[in-house]
Each structure stands twice: as C-alpha cells, then as structure tokens.
Image (tube, rainbow, N blue to C red):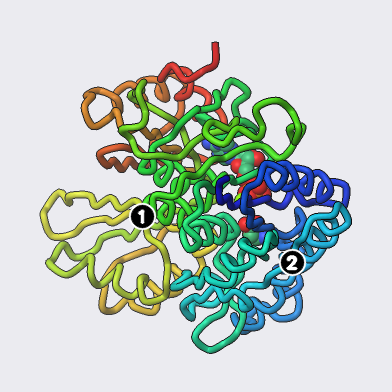
Amino acid sequence: MARIVMKFGGTSVANIERIKNVARHVKREVDAGNEVAVVVSAMAGKTNELVGWTREASPMHDAREYDVVVASGEQVTAGLLAIVLQSMGINARSWLGWQIPIETDNAHGAARITKIDGSQLIQRFKEGQVAVIAGFQGIGPDKRITTLGRGGSDTSAVAVAAAVKADRCDIYTDVDGVYTTDPRIDPKARRLPKVAFEEMLEMASLGAKVLQVRSVELAMVHKVRTFVRSSFEDPDAPGMGDPINPPGTLICDEDEIVEQQVVTGIAFAKEEAQISLRRLADRPGISAAIFGPLAEEHVNVDMIVQNISEDGSKTDMTFTVPATDIDKAVATLEANKKEIGFDVIQSETDLAKVSIIGIGMRSHAGVAATAFKALAEKGINIRAITTSEIKISILIDNAYTELAVRTLHTVYGLDKG
Ligand code: ADP
Ligand code: ASP
Ligand code: MG
C-alpha cells in the first residue's frame, strides 16, 4: 500500500466524459489498496475566461476579488469529480483550500503556500476516504481566498504530497511526460525517462509550462517523488498502476540519472520585450538607479547588457522584461528620468528567449559556440545572451522561435531517431 497524490490538469477535466476517465485512474489506485488524494485544475479554458471577466469588469481590479473569481473554476471540478467517484461506489469528499487549510501568504494572485495541515486528510485516508482537493487556491493571513499564480495546481499537488508524506505525486496532463522540448513545437521531441530537479527548474522557469516552477522547487526541497504522465492513456492498460515505475517522466535527484547527456532540453518563452536606455552617464550607482525603481514596481528584469562607451563617459544599457510589463517599465523609467539621466528610451516587443539546458554543461566546453554557429547558419540574429552553469539563453526575434528551437534540438542530438 502506498500514499499517492494524483493531479489532473485542465484538459484532463475539460468535460464530464473526461472527468469520468479521471475517476477511472483514481479507482485503479484505490482498488490497488492505496491511500489517495486527488488535486484538480479548472476545466480547460475556464481560468482564462474568469480572468477575462475580471478585466472586463474593471481593468484595475482588486487582487482579493480577482482571487475570489478565478479560484471558482477549481471548486466546480472538485465537486464534479467527487460526485462521479461516489457514483462509482468510491468514498470521496471534496475539499477547498480553506477547508484543509492550505495556508498562503498575502500575495493575492501569486500567493506562496506557507503551511498545510495534513492531519485531517490523513485521518480521512485512515477511514478509507479519497480526498478531492481544489488546486490553485489557498487561504491568506487575511482569511480570504488566495490563488497561487497560473499553473498553480501543480504546486498545490506537490505541497499536499509533502504535507501528507506521500510516496508519490503523479502529475497527469495532456502529454505523456517531460520532453526534450515542447512536443507541440517540435515533432522530433523525445520523452525523457528522468529529469533532474535542477534541470526541470530551469526548463520550467525558462518557459516549459508542463510544471509550475514553484512545484519543482517544492519537490526538490521536500524530496517528493514526482512523475509527469498522461491522463489520456487507458487507465487500465498494463503497467499504468505500476507503483515503482509508472509510465511517464520521473523528476529526481541527478545521481538517479545514469545516462547523462550534455544537453537535456530546449525551452522557449515568447512575449519578451527589450528596453534600451541610450547615452547614460557611466557612473557608479547607475544600475541601482535603473533597476531599483523597476523592482519596486515588481517588473521582472531578465537579461541585462551594458555597452562600454567609446569615451568612457556615456554608456547604453539594454535589458529584457516580459512583454506584459513593457508599458509599466517604460512609465517607471520615464518617471525616474532625472535620477537616472538617460538620453532616450527605445523599446521593442515581439522577441523570444530560447534556452539550452543540461547539467552536463558543467563539465563540457563549447556548448554555446555550437548554438551560435547553428543559429548563424539559419540567418537568426542573436540580440542578447545570458549563461549559467547549466543553461544558455539567447534572445531572438519572435518570428524565428520555432526555427531556432528545432535547429538547436537537432544540433545537440536530441531528435528522436
Ligand atoms: P495542464 O493543464 O495539465 O496543467 P499544461 O498545459 O499546463 O497542462 O502543461 C502541459 C503542456 O506543456 C503540454 O501540452 C505541452 O505543450 C507543454 N510543454 C512545454 N514544454 C514541454 C516539455 N518540455 N515537455 C512536455 N510538455 C511541454
Ligand atoms: N486553473 C489554473 C490555471 O489555469 C491552475 C492550473 O491549471 O494549474 O492557471
Ligand atoms: Mg499546467
């Protein structure tokens, strides 16, 4: 007997028929004698619709009320799945975030889980009951509903798994694992049997939305054995109930991975924007004068490039921000123009960041040079580059994203044979 947390994403619960299919996956694990908690997302498209309504009601709405609205999608699916499970003779009960409770901080719209009391869930497990938990939501210190940021049900699931000391957390989605790149962009992408926590963290933060970044952090810290697997496979196909090696991708410590590649995957993020400040005074404190006010406005600055000026007195600074933040960033810089002391601001949207990820890069030279050469041969212009020990990120024009991803995928030998 094992204790398992199963999470089902939006496309897996998109309609009643799919919810019935999810219930069959749950039944398989219950019939095998396991203790089961299920975390569900809202039906596909529902959260987008709810977010749209809050904007339509008022573009500058209160974040607490945003959370009240957008958390409702998960309430519906939790109730529906409990109803279907009960109709199959399974003892099941739905739980909203506040009922458990899943406590979070006060950052409405992007809250972080601070504590989960697993005792009630464990008590119900002992009574043979399946808990069906609304993902994405919690309760803040102000006792109001919070949400965990887009894709947050993954984080709910891993956090619940850590709280109840589950043996496994299975993230069921519409692909059968983590691939070398988004299989929707590159049909030659390969499924990876295992991915190291550090690599998955980079892949998720650099655009691979298959797992929310925070869920990977929690899995790494709490050593939660997390599998990414498909809800669309026949729930009763052979091997689906395998307690040790279920089909899918295991996110694990790097020493569990025997065959290490130099490059594990390619991630990409569209919707990047670039800002250049021209003819700044080249003096100590200039970076603080620029990035301090942006940080205060919660603008997430990513790649930063500072040019050396010819005469040593004036410089140019170029950096990227998410396209959604561009207006806020430019307005903040204009408001601080006097303190910063630049000549002009230039901004550009329609950019993309393509990233090459692999822990094997730590011990291999020349990985970046291969990318630069391959992109040059395709006529793709590189606007900025950042690197860390295990990743290289390259800023390019959005229109070349797919070509760049496929080119890099091939050049690093990731294409399936
Ligand atoms: P869910 O609704 O189940 O949470 P998401 O849409 O959030 O599902 O995440 C699954 C999607 O992530 C896939 O459909 C796929 O297009 C995308 N994706 C991006 N990068 C990858 C990758 N490297 N491996 C697998 N899927 C990826
Ligand atoms: N329903 C939420 C979203 O669409 C949470 C999730 O799916 O994980 O962002
Ligand atoms: Mg998701």
Q: Residue furthest bottom?
A: 142
Q: Nearer the viewer, mark 2 or mark 1?
A: 2
Residue 33, placed above or below residue 371: below
Q: Mark 2 — residue?
A: 93
Q: Which residue lies at the image location 41% right of the left edge and 37% below the top edge?
A: 355
What amino acid is found at the position of numbered circle 1 in the picture?
A: Val
Q: Looking at the image, is mark 2 or mark 1 earlier in the sequence? A: 2
Amino acid at the residue labelled 2: Arg
Point out residue 45 in the picture as x, y percentages from the top left corner: 76, 56
In this rendered view, identify the residue nearer to me: 254 or 59.
Answer: 254
Q: Residue furthest top?
A: 417
Q: Is residue 95 visible?
A: yes
Tell me which residue sits at (67%, 65%) in the image.
Answer: 134
Residue 260 picture quarter:
top left
Q: Position of residue 265 (x, y in %)?
A: 45, 31
Q: Which mark is residue 289?
A: none
Q: Is residue 388 left or right of residue 394?
A: left
Is disc 2's CB within 8 Å of ligand 2?
no
Element class at badge 1: helix
**Residue 351 visible in the shown view:** no
User: Which image quarter: residue 297?
Assistant: bottom left
Question: Nearest the camera: 128 or 295?
Answer: 128
Name the residue beneath numbered marker 1.
221
Establish if 322 lies above or below 186.
below
- Spatial CA span between label 2 and label 1: 29 Å
Q: Position of residue 135 (x, y in %)?
A: 63, 63
Dot 2 lies on which element?
A: strand
